[in-house]
Image (cartoon, rainbow, N blue to C red):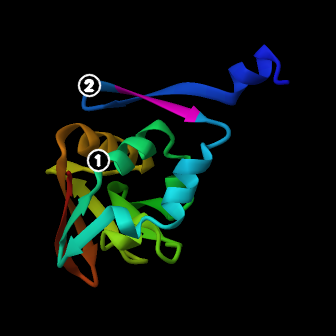
């Protein structure tokens, strides 16, 4: 039986401010088995054609409740050029991970989402929340010196 202290420590709420807007995220210490299991095989929930992907709404809602398994599918590191943040490098992508399914590759530099610069990992979290609430987002990435825009929609 879990104590009330253990339950209180099992989940917490974190705030993130982006462009003056406060986003609240709930994180659970133990991800629900269904979220982790769905993320292990996300391919049924993702449909892509070229640089445009569609995610299943129920799948995104599951991730919104607990994004911890998603954070384990890639490593993100801020890129600073001459003291100026330029984006977030994506690397360590797991095979068949959601980021890989939507078209990201190791070494991609995520620079902005819907025209808003992404300068740190918190910006990636805010971008996911923005996608979830608006239903569509355009992710600008630099790959091999070229800029590519990936569009992700939720249905």
User: Can you say whether 119 is above or below 99 in the image?
Assistant: above
Callout 2: few (<14), some (14-19), or many (20+) C-alpha neighbours within 10 Å? few
- The residue at the far bottom in this view is 144
Distance from disc 1 to disc 2, alpha carbons, whole Å, reads 27 Å
Residue at 23% in and 55% down: 112
* Closer to us: 14 or 2: 2
Residue tagged by mark 1?
Answer: 57
Q: Kindly report which numbered mark, 1 or 2, lies closer to the viewer in this rendering.
A: 1
Residue at 49% in and 72% down: 93
Where disc 2 sits, the SS reads loop
Report x, y in % for residue 154. Answer: 22, 51
Report x, y in % for residue 151. Answer: 17, 62
Magenta residues, start to end: 23-27
Do we see residue 127 in this rendering?
Answer: yes
Report x, y in % for residue 78. Answer: 43, 57
* Closer to us: 144 or 131: 131
Residue 20 inside the magenta-drawn segment? no
User: In the picture provided, is 89 more to the left or to the right than 34?
Assistant: left
Do we see residue 82 in this rendering?
Answer: no
* Closer to us: 129 or 47: 47
- The residue at the far right in this view is 1
Residue tagged by mark 2?
Answer: 20
């Amino acid at each position: 039986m879990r104590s009330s202290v253990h339950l209180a420590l099992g989940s917490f709420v974190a705030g993130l401010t982006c462009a003056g807007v406060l986003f609240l995220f709930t994180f659970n210490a133990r991800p629900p088995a269904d979220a982790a299991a769905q993320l292990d095989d996300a391919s049924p929930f993702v449909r892509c054609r070229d640089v445009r992907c569609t995610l299943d709404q129920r799948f995104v809602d599951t991730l919104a409740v607990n994004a911890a398994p998603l954070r384990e599918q890639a490593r993100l590191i801020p890129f600073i050029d001459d003291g100026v943040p330029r984006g977030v490098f994506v690397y360590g992508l797991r095979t068949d991970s959601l980021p890989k399914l939507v078209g990201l590759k190791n070494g991609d530099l995520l620079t902005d989402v819907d025209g808003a610069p992404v300068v740190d990992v918190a910006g990636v979290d805010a971008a996911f929340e923005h996608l979830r609430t608006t239903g569509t987002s355009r992710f600008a990435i630099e790959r091999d010196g070229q800029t590519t825009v990936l569009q992700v929609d939720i249905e």
